[in-house]
């Protein structure tokens, strides 16, 4: 098993169904980890690999949808809901909150497997994006304080002159800072840098149209 | 022998050979006499000198070498016949050997030729005797061989003198040459010059003199020869002689010599030459020897002088010399150094002596005089003076000088020595100063100080002593006796001489200090007492050097002592003659003095009383002199006194000298100093034996009587009329609380008599006694010691013939009086009690006469006993105070009681003092005597008027209420504590249609009868049970049931009962009200039917939702089945197929499919709403199954399920699955309810059989139920995600089984769901 091999977490209070799902996924050669309740899942040690969470809506401790809401803030694997009696409001809510699929028991093999595959693929993509973002954050952290001041001004679209005036430095100095920022952030062009800034959620505090006359 | 012949060095032998040959040549040259080959024989000199210088052990070599040389010379020059030559040589050798032996024997080896004796020995033995041998042998040889026709006589002289001359000339030269060659003594330049000059002069004179032409005689050569010999000794002599020989030879050879003449005279001349040479040699050698000797002596003198000088210079004393005239000529270097002056400083310019530079000017004149005297007289000089030092200071020196005289006695020199005595002088001065001080001190000491030698001879008296005894130590020098003896004789009082001498002798013998008192004679003949002490002074070895003694004049002290002693003596005599035994004791109790009488009394001498076995003298005295029986008491008292300082006074028996004991009274009192410390104890013993005997007799007699008297409880006193209590027995003393001591001290019985009795006494008793001599017993009182009074009965009588004294008998009346008083008190108290009791008490005689009424009664009726007549008292009393209506009854009751003796009791109205008649309860009881006869009737009246009035009021009210109850439109029932109806209201009676009393005839209890008869059979059990429970617990009762009306119709009634309690809270009665609610019940039933219908309708409406819930139940296993099926399919289609896993999944599929089927059938059963397939099952098993179903979930939710099932439950006919569903549902609900519980989560499941049902309970400890009546409604839920169907379904299931399901509060918290299943249902199927 390679480290990158995906895993499927199953959370269902029915031991029989847990068993059956594990068996099924095992027959598909997919690693699984099953939990009887949301808290067991939360407290469990989970490997850092692409994953998918099969979550029962009716759980003894908390509702599966509530669990989805709880873990929404963190990095969590994409969720495939399963439920004994799927109602429309619940499924809408689940999908709206980012669930990959909402399957009603009993569900077919094909539906489940396609949902799992989609979820794992999505997780892979998310993980890649997260690592890129981490790299960008790291680079951003390596900027000098002055460079960190320069970056938002530049990506806000201010002219060098305006940005220099804003910071009370000469245009030449600003030019140097700007070049350093580009280089350190690995931006090939200003457009690239803007994109990076977006990903880093650097607020664009100045608009060129405002003309730097901010009080 | 090889040792004997030691070969000299060949060089020496060669030199000897050459010298010998040269000598032979020289001899040949001087042989001027024709017929004689040789005149002077130098080889003889060489030979003898060699032998003298060499060891005799080498001599054969020299003789051999000399022989060869002789032979060689014979061949060269002499040409004698060899035999002759050999013989001549033998003679020569023999001569040389003899000469050398003799010289060596005379002078010893090595030859030095320095003294005259050596030179003479050489000359005589070597130069004269030795040639005798050689000349004789040679001459004989010449004569033998007839060589040159020589005769022995003619040749011998020449031969002898020639050999002698040869020896004289050559041997010294040889000796000197060899010796000085060895010495290497160098001559100084001047000596060389002088030697040269002498040699020149000598040569010149020799040449001139010997040539005979210019000087008349050769002897003119003597002066220079002698000069050389004198100046240069042997070297000079030898050298000069050699020169002379050479000159002589030269001249002789040349013929110029005056010894060369014509052949006739040649022989004589030859002899002259020999003589000349011999004399020259002889003279020169002698002079040289003399010179040598002189030189040696001179050398020795110089050497010793130098040593002396060195000695003087190093002697650490000042040494000096003076000329015979007394002028200083020498100062030793030390002296010069120390004083800084030289002898030249001590000589004045005119050459006279001047010592000013050396001697202190104070000493100068005296010393000068003394020194001059010594010098003039030639006396040795001795003087001490201060000598000036180089640094200008002066030091004391002692100077001695003695003259050195020559043989004639003339003074040659003065020699002096000065020794530094500064330190000694200083020390002596210091010593003499100290000694002077000491002697002054000793003289000033205010004692007589004396010193004796080790043998005891006085050597010193100090001045004080000398003044005292009027003589000095020298005064003890008397002929024929020692100083000590003389001193003793002179100054010691005649009476003291013997002990003094003895003590002194002993001290001297032993070295012990001497101490004694004696009388010393003063110079004026008066003797004074002296206290004298002497101690030896010892050196380091302990030998006694001196005795030092001191005498103190103690005359005054002795006189004072004498006075004291005399006065003491007088006192002692006084004390001794006092007719009382006196003793003094030290503060610790030790006897220090017994007076004569005391000593006499006890026959003990205090001074001889140191008994070693007793601890102290006091004990010894006590042990010896006191009667053994008295010893412990006395010892104790004595020790007590010693310890406390209190005086001792004791009587005891003292042993007398004759062995009898006599009683003494011993008093010992302390003498104290101002601080209160005991200084001394004085004791006096008085003989009281006679008194004591008398006393004891009396006492014995008295004791007998006293015992008699004391055995009585009656006090007996002997008194006199003055108030004195002469004696009293113990009984009396106890009575008045005095003791015997106080009695002995004196008690005044008048003082004991209270004042009022004193008057009585004065008025009556005294008179009575005076008249009759007796006093009749009478009661009176005495004061006790503590001031209280004692009542007594006293009778007295005077002694016969004595009107003022008598005996009295006294009886203590205290107890009697006290008893009387107590009785009185009790009576008074009773009276008070009876009077103050708030009950009217009265008493009548058996004859019905009022005897007593108490104060309460008197106050109540306002009359006194006296107000009733003595005759017919009781009727009169009744007439007076009893209500007219009651009089007859009262009288009749009383009369009957009086006749029968039964207690009397009646309520009647009595008239109170204010005229009001009040209800009174009267009682009376008889008092009987021992024989049972009635003595009195005691009665009590109690006013019960208010009570009676109140009771009447109460009755009135009750009657009112009664009527009220009877007329109320409610059915009211009153029951006793045990529930038995005691009253039923009119309404109830009417309803039931029978009277309460009718029930009594049935033989059952009223309650049971009522229930049996009235309550609907269906309700009967519940009513009974509940009613019994309420009766038991006291809880209010409330129940609806159907009750049979009089017309047979059962009507619903609601019966309520509540206990009525008294003030203490105890139940007095049950009040029951029974309401006819039949109409309401009917209405309610209709309502509930409507509700049910409504509920069913709403159930149906929400069936869709319900089906969703069911779908969930089913879908769950279904989903598992589907998933497992897919898995199975995959396992089977896998390559290769995984059959094992497939099989497992198939098993799961079957299981899950069955679960789904179960659910479906369950749901079907639920909706069927009818008892399904009932089977006979055990509820216990179902409960246990349910528990095991839930156990996994319970474990997850941390809930403990406790199951408690009663044994032996009957099997029930039931549908197993729904009942299990119910249990699971209830258990899950319980667990849900406990989700919020923090502590222990316990779910209790109990199954019991109660009456006809099996009752199952599921109790949780959650939050309890807010709406216990609503929770069973369908769709009612308290859970966020519940359907609200569970409990509704459960209830419908339970009810379908004919049971009930309800909820209760659980204690202490939580909810309890209970369902019952009827046992009867077992009957089915």
Image: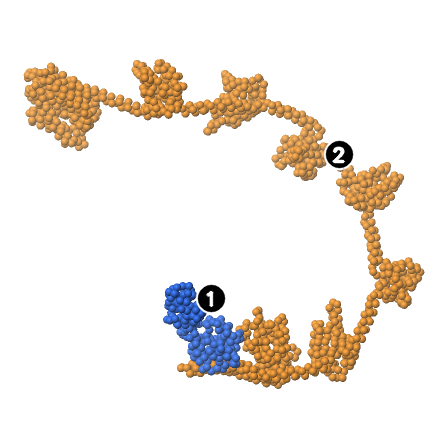
Provide residue B439's location: percent of width, then percent of height.
50, 22
| Left or right placement of residue B19 versus residue B1150 in this view | left
Give the residue at mark 1. A215
Q: Could you say where residue A197 lies in the image, as x and y percent from the top left? A: 42, 70
Chain letter behind tag 2: B
Can residue B1248 be seen?
A: no
Q: Is residue B1230 left or right of residue B582?
A: left
Q: Residue at x 17, y 29 (%)?
A: B58
Label ID, residue B1004: none
- Kind of element beneath mark 2: helix
Q: Colour of chain A?
A: blue
Where disc 1 sits, the SS reads: loop
Question: Residue B1308 appears in which quarter of the rendering?
Answer: bottom right
Pointer 2 residue = B691
Quarter in which the C terminus of chain B is drawn: bottom right
The chain that hosts pointer 1 is A
C-alpha separation, residue under disc 2 versus residue under disc 1? 146 Å
Asked if B643 appears above or below B1187 in the picture, the reply is above
The location of residue B492, given as percent across then percent down, is: 56, 20
Q: Is residue B916 left or right of residue B1233?
A: right
| Camera-side residue of B1146 and B806 | B1146
Label 2 environment density (alpha carbons within 10 Å; few <14, some 14–19, many ≥20): few
Q: Quadrant of residue B1063?
A: bottom right
């Amino acid at each position: 098993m390679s480290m990158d091999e995906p895993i499927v977490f199953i959370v269902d209070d029915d031991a029989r169904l847990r068993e059956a799902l594990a068996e099924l996924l095992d027959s598909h050669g997919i690693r699984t980890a099953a939990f009887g309740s949301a808290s067991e899942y939360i407290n469990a040690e989970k490997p850092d690999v692409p994953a998918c969470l099969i979550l029962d809506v009716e759980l003894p401790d908390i509702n599966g949808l509530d669990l989805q809401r709880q873990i929404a803030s963190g990095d969590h694997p994409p969720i495939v809901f399963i439920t004994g009696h799927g109602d429309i409001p619940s499924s809408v809510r689940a999908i709206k909150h980012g669930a990959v699929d909402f399957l009603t028991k009993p569900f077919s093999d094909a539906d489940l497997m396609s949902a799992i595959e989609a979820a794992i693929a999505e997780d892979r993509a998310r993980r890649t994006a997260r690592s890129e973002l981490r790299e960008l954050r790291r680079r951003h952290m390596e900027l000098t304080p002055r460079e960190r001041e320069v970056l938002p001004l530049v990506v806000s679209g201010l002219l060098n002159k305006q940005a220099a005036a804003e910071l009370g430095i000469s245009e030449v100095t600003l030019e140097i800072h700007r070049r350093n920022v580009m280089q350190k952030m690995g931006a090939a062009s200003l457009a690239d840098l803007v994109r990076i800034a977006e990903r880093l959620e650097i607020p664009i505090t100045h608009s060129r149209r405002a003309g730097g006359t901010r009080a | 022998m090889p040792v004997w012949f030691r070969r000299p060095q060949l060089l020496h032998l060669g030199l000897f050979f050459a010298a010998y040959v040269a000598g032979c040549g020289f001899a040949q040259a001087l042989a001027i006499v024709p017929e004689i080959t040789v005149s002077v024989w130098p080889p003889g000199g060489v030979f003898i000198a060699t032998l003298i210088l060499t060891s005799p052990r080498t001599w054969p070599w020299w003789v051999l070498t000399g022989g060869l040389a002789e032979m060689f010379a014979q061949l060269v020059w002499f040409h004698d016949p060899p035999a002759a030559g050999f013989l001549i040589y033998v003679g020569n050798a023999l001569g040389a050997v003899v000469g050398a032996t003799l010289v060596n024997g005379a002078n010893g080896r090595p030859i030095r030729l320095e003294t005259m004796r050596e030179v003479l020995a050489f000359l005589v033995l070597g130069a004269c005797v030795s040639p005798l041998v050689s000349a004789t042998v040679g001459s004989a040889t010449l004569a033998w061989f007839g060589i040159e026709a020589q005769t022995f006589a003619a040749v011998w002289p020449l031969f002898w003198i020639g050999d002698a001359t040869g020896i004289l000339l050559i041997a010294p030269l040889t000796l000197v040459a060899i010796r000085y060659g060895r010495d290497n003594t160098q001559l100084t330049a001047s000596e060389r010059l002088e030697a040269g000059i002498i040699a020149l002069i000598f040569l010149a004179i020799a040449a001139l003199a010997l040539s005979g032409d210019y000087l008349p005689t050769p002897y003119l050569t003597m002066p220079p020869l002698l000069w050389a010999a004198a100046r240069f000794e042997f070297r000079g002599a030898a050298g000069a002689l050699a020169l002379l020989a050479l000159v002589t030879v030269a001249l002789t050879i040349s013929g110029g010599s005056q010894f060369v003449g014509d052949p006739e005279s040649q022989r004589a001349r030859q002899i002259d030459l020999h003589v000349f040479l011999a004399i020259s040699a002889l003279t020169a050698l002698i002079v040289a020897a003399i010179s040598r000797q002189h030189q040696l002596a001179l050398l020795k003198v110089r050497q010793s002088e130098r040593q002396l000088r060195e000695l003087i210079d190093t002697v650490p004393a000042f040494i000096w010399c003076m000329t015979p005239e007394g002028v200083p000529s020498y100062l030793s270097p030390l002296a010069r150094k120390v004083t800084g002056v030289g002898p030249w400083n001590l000589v004045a310019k005119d050459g006279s002596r001047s010592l000013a530079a050396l001697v202190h000017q104070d000493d100068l004149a005296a010393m000068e005089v003394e020194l001059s005297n010594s010098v003039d007289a030639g006396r040795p000089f001795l003087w001490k003076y201060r000598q000036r030092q180089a640094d200008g200071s002066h030091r004391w020196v002692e100077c001695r000088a003695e003259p050195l005289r020559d043989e004639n006695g003339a003074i040659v020199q003065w020699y002096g020595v000065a020794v530094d005595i500064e330190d000694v002088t200083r020390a002596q001065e210091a010593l003499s100063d100290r000694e002077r001080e000491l002697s002054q001190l000793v003289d000033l000491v205010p004692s007589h100080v004396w010193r004796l030698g080790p043998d005891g001879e006085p050597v010193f008296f100090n001045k004080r002593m000398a003044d005292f005894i009027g003589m000095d130590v020298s005064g003890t020098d008397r002929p024929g006796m020692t100083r000590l003896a003389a001193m003793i004789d002179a100054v010691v009082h005649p009476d003291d001489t013997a002990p003094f001498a003895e003590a002194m002798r002993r001290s001297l013998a032993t070295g012990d200090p001497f101490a004694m008192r004696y009388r010393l004679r003063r110079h004026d003949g008066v003797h004074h007492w002296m206290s004298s002490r002497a101690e030896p002074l010892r050196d380091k070895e302990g030998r006694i050097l001196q005795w030092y003694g001191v005498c103190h004049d103690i005359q005054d002290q002795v006189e004072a002592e004498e006075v004291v002693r005399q006065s003491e003596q007088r006192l002692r005599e006084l004390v001794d003659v006092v007719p009382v035994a006196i003793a003094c004791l030290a503060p610790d109790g030790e006897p220090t003095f017994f007076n004569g009488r005391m000593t006499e009394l006890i026959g003990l001498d205090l001074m001889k009383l140191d008994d070693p076995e007793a601890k102290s003298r006091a004990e010894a005295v006590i042990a010896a002199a006191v009667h053994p029986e008295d010893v412990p008491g006395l010892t104790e008292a004595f020790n007590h006194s010693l310890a406390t300082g209190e005086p001792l006074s004791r009587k005891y028996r003292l042993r007398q000298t004759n062995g009898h004991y006599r009683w003494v009274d011993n008093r010992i009192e302390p003498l104290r100093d101002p601080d209160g410390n005991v200084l001394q104890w004085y004791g006096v013993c008085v003989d009281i034996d006679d008194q004591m005997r008398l006393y004891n007799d009396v006492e014995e007699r008295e004791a007998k009587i006293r015992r008699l008297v004391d055995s009585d409880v009656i006090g007996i006193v002997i008194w006199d009329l003055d108030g004195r209590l002469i004696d009293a027995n113990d009984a009396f003393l106890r009575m008045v609380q005095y003791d015997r001591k106080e009695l002995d001290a004196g008690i005044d019985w008048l003082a004991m008599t209270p004042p009022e009795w004193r008057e009585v006494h004065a008025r009556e008793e005294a008179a009575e006694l005076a008249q009759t001599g007796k006093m009749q017993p009478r009661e009176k009182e005495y004061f006790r010691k503590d001031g209280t009074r004692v009542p007594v009965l006293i009778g007295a009588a005077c002694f016969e013939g004595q009107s003022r004294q008598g005996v009295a008998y006294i009886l203590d009346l205290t107890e009697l009086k006290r008893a009387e008083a107590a009785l009185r008190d009790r009576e008074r108290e009773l009276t008070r009690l009876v009077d103050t009791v708030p009950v009217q008490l009265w008493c009548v005689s058996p004859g019905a006469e009022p005897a007593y009424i108490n104060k309460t009664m008197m106050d109540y009726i306002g009359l006194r006993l006296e107000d009733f007549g003595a005759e017919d008292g009781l009727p009169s009393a009744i007439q007076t105070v009893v209500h007219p209506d009651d009089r007859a009854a009262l009288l009749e009751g009383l009369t009957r009681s009086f006749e029968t003796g039964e207690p009397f009791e009646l309520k009647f109205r009595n008239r109170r003092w204010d005229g009001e008649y009040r209800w009174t309860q009267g009682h009376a009881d008889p008092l009987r005597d021992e024989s049972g006869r009635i003595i009195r009737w005691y009665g009590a009246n109690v006013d019960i008027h208010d009570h009676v009035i109140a009771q009447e009021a109460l009755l009135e009210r009750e009657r009112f209420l009664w009527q009220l109850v009877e007329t109320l439109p409610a059915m009211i029932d009153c029951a006793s504590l045990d529930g038995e109806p005691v009253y039923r209201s009119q309404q109830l009676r009417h309803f039931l249609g029978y009277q309460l009393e009718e029930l009594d005839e049935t033989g059952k209890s009223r309650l049971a009868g009522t229930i049996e008869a009235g309550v609907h059979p269906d309700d009967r059990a519940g009513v009974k049970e509940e009613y019994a429970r309420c009766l038991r617990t006291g809880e209010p009762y409330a129940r609806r049931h159907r009750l049979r009306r009089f017309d047979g119709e059962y009507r619903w009634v609601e019966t309520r009962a509540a206990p009525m309690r008294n003030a203490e809270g105890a139940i007095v009665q049950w009040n029951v009200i029974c309401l006819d609610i039949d109409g309401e019940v009917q209405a309610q039933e209709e309502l509930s039917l409507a509700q049910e219908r409504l509920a069913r309708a709403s159930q149906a409406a929400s069936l869709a939702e319900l089906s969703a819930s069911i779908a969930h139940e089913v879908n769950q296993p279904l989903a598992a089945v589907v998933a497992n099926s897919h898995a199975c399919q995959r396992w089977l289609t896998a390559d290769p197929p995984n059959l094992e896993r497939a099989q497992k999944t198939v098993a799961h599929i079957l299981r899950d499919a069955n679960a789904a089927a179960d659910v479906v059938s369950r749901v079907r059963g639920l909706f069927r709403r009818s008892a399904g397939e009932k089977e006979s099952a055990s509820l216990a098993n179902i409960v246990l199954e349910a528990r095991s179903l839930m156990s996994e979930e319970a474990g997850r939710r941390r809930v403990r399920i406790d199951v408690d099932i009663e044994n032996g439950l009957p099997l029930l006919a039931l549908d197993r699955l729904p009942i299990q569903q119910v249990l699971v549902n209830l258990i899950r609900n319980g667990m849900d309810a406990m989700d919020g519980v923090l502590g222990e989560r316990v779910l209790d499941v109990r199954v019991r059989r109660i009456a006809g049902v099996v009752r199952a309970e599921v109790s949780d400890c959650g939050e309890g139920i807010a709406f216990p009546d609503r929770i069973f409604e369908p769709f009612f839920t308290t859970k966020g995600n519940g359907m609200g169907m569970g409990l509704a379904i459960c209830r419908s299931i339970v009810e379908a089984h004919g049971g009930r399901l309800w909820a209760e509060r659980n204690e202490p918290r939580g909810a309890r769901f209970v369902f019952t299943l009827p046992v009867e249902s077992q009957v089915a199927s």
